[in-house]
Image: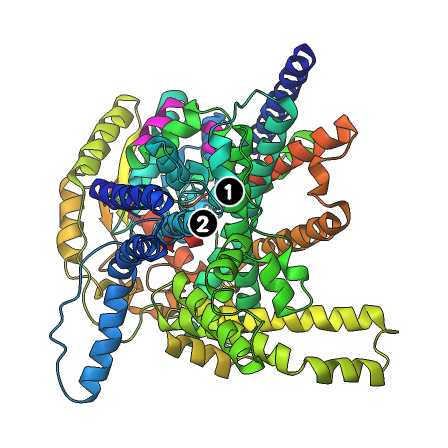
Amino acid sequence: MAFVPIYILILGFTIGIDYFAGLYIERTEEPQKKKLLLIVSLLSNILILAVFKYYNFINESLSFIVNFFGHQNPIPFLKILLPIGLSFHTFQAMSYTIEVFRGNQKAEKHFGIYALYVMFYPQLVAGPIERPQNVLHQFYERHYFDYRRVTDGLKLMLWGMFKKVVIADRLSVMVNEVYSDVYSYHGFSFVLATMFFAFQIYCDFSGYSDMALGSAKVMGFKLMRNFDVPYFSKSIKEFWGRWHISLSTWFRDYLYIPLGGNRVEKWRWCTNLFIVFLASGLWHGANWTFVIWGALHGVYQIVGILTEKIRSKCQQIFELVKLKVIYNGLQWLTTFLLVCFAWIFFRANSFSDAWYIINHLSFSNFDIVRNVRGEAFYFSLPLWKFLMSIGGVVFLLIVEYLTIYLGRTPMFYVSNKVVRWSFIYVIILAILIFGYFEVNEFIYFQF
Amino acid sequence: MKIHLKDIISFFTILLVLLGTFQFVLKTGVKYSGDAQTGKVNRIFNHELTSHMVVFGPSVAEVGINANVLANKLNISVYNAAIDGTAFGQYKCMINELADYSEETKYVLFAITYFDFSKMTKLNEPSRFFAHLDNDYVYNDFKEIDPDKIMKMRYIPFYSIIQYSHTFYKNSIIGWKSLLKGKKSDTLNGFVPHYISFTNTLVSSDTAKEFISIDTAQMYSFLKLSDKLKSCNKKVIVVFMPMYEQGQNHFSNMKEIINEMKSWVEPNHFIDFSNSIYCNDESNFYNNNHLNAKGAMLVSEDLARQLLERKLIL
């Protein structure tokens, strides 16, 4: 990660364009002119995103095609860095002009307040991607010191920190070991590394979101929830209602519904879903692996829709309702495995790596490396560190399971002060003792 | 607000006491651990080591100098205080401390290899020393290698906790057991024998020769330390440890490096095993750099003989 001061101008440019676009859209009576202003605003945002994030990717794909026909691609590649969090603040800025255009939000008159909406530091680099209706009015409210609110925010930040440094960063050591050298690993190692990645990316991203929500809360601001125990979902549809909620709802509101949503013929509905998930994949990164990841989730959803009737019939025939626990468990397991399968493409460094992993997945052949002294290493880690990482995941799952029933992270909200404080002390100590403190950026910073 | 203030003060007071106690208990335990390398560090910084001869160096010394063989042949007490993975820049703090307190120690033997005086860019297993970070020698030497981490550890309260490794926690438990039940004696006097046969650790495709560089600052530091040891009435002896010949061939300037090191040491006080007969026989090694138990026995016997022949041991 590098700090390039000149990149502030990019942010300044989009803020300026969208601020004035918002004002003029509101003032203009003519629908055609309103539309034109919206298009100018959206295009300027998309253009910046396209240049910084997708130019080289498109050019690389073009080179591949041109080379295939025996020619050289004359278009040069750009030597530029992707500004941190570009996809996030671009989408947040776009939601503003769209909402003003739709008449759901009044144009912000104060330039500073609008700039704050785009650059609000807790969620600037990795979301949640906020909506103007939720945030802008909060900048005008007076925020008094509220002990309960401040401590709740701090607890949320602490829990986010725990997820990041104790679970995600510990798992990252093993995941990186396997995914950076896939040809040295086999079978079950891939299964395990992919499952670890599922929890790594969840704890990394939801950990950041918790810290963002927590720090905003300390200052008196309420941001939208971004995760809601996604790995307890029993279908892919449910998963997307619980994973990166701010992005899912963004695509729902500004792409899926305008395309017609589900109020169209079935084939159109499926096409709409597929387009949305392709776009979501592309949003995550300029690489075919992300596109495939998105496409896979699109296919999952379409298959879910097409097999809905058959599945309900099977449910009736086999009286699966009576076997509720087993049925729910199977649904959960299938969803989790499908999500993990798609994560292979998300994490792999290239399509060929992902393909190699898929072709070598099995429940046998777990790689244990021994050094000259005969000590065993599991993904480069000694057994105790390996088990500690798994312990972190188990702890997380227990906490999340309890969260479903209590409606919030349990340990911080126990009414008994001694128990509550003890939990907090344990979490602080756990971060200090078990935390992994090598430099490890948040995964979603790259998007 | 008054109630909240009471809560805030109580919460942070308990937290400070908790973390302070935790750190104190951990550090105290580690300071009394006699286990392996941490035990060696403790023996010196707790001023428990009083052997006539103390051996310093990296892993080649730890596995290659049999202290008991030397002791029997020379008729003096010998302790092998070598620590694996370290170079002079990291273990010199132990020698400085020893020079300050020990009157009994008369001989300081450096059993070195090609990287001992290279520039250190990273501390290796520093947690073996962390319980003694308030010692100025440890602090200053470690600060030279990793200033950012070491300064934070000394001056930011509880920052150290995030740096403590698994070894540190293990040693704390061992230390507390020793405090309660008494310390186990180290019958091998710091020597760690390896009863395994040779494995070639060089990759066959890796034919490019490596160039070794010496850090002149480290050599001056060595010279300064040698003078200090001499002024404390301690003899400095430097031994270049044997390396299996194919391991030596991996480096392009091995001979030059040895000659360079030799030029910084008093004549007759430098013993070079790089050309010895042990280097041609793989049965003396467990890899290209390290002697196994059999090799260590042979080299230690030969070393004792040479020390007597050169009249370095009185």
Q: Is mark 1 on a helix, strand or loop?
A: helix
Horizontal side of B169 relative to A98 (left or right) equals right
Q: Could you say which is closer to the camera, residue A359 or residue B208?
A: A359
Horizontal side of B250 relative to B124 (left or right) equals left
Horizontal side of A312 relative to A270 (left or right) equals right
Horizontal side of B152 relative to A389 (left or right) equals left
Q: Could you say which is closer to the camera, residue B45 or residue A93?
A: A93
Marks 1,2: beta carbons within 8 A: yes
The residue to which callout 2 is attached is A99
x and y, in percent, of residue A191 in the image: 56, 72
In reply to whether residue B151 is colored magenta, the answer given is no
Q: Main secondary structure of the magenta part?
A: helix
Determine the image quadrant of residue A74: bottom left
Residues flagged by tags 1 and 2 on a common chain: yes
Characterize the local packing of mark 1: few (<14), some (14-19) or many (20 or more) Cα atoms within 10 angstroms: some
Q: Could you say which is closer to the camera, residue A143 or residue A375?
A: A143
Per the rendering, the mark at residue B31 is: none
The N terminus of chain B: image quadrant:
top right
Find the magenta span and give its range.
B130-143
Disc 2 marks which amino acid?
Answer: Glu
Tell which subunit mark 1 falls on: A
x and y, in percent, of residue A270 in the image: 54, 78
Q: Which residue is drawn at 26% across and 24% down?
A: B228
In reply to whether residue B141 is colored magenta, the answer given is yes
**Is residue A245 shown to the viewer in this render?**
yes
The residue to which callout 1 is attached is A133
x and y, in percent, of residue B37 in the image: 48, 42
Q: Could you say which is closer to the camera, residue B288 or residue A70?
A: A70
* Position of A5 relative to B277 (above/below): above
Label 1 to label 2, Cα distance in Å? 8 Å
x and y, in percent, of residue A45 in the image: 31, 54
Tell which subunit mark 2 falls on: A
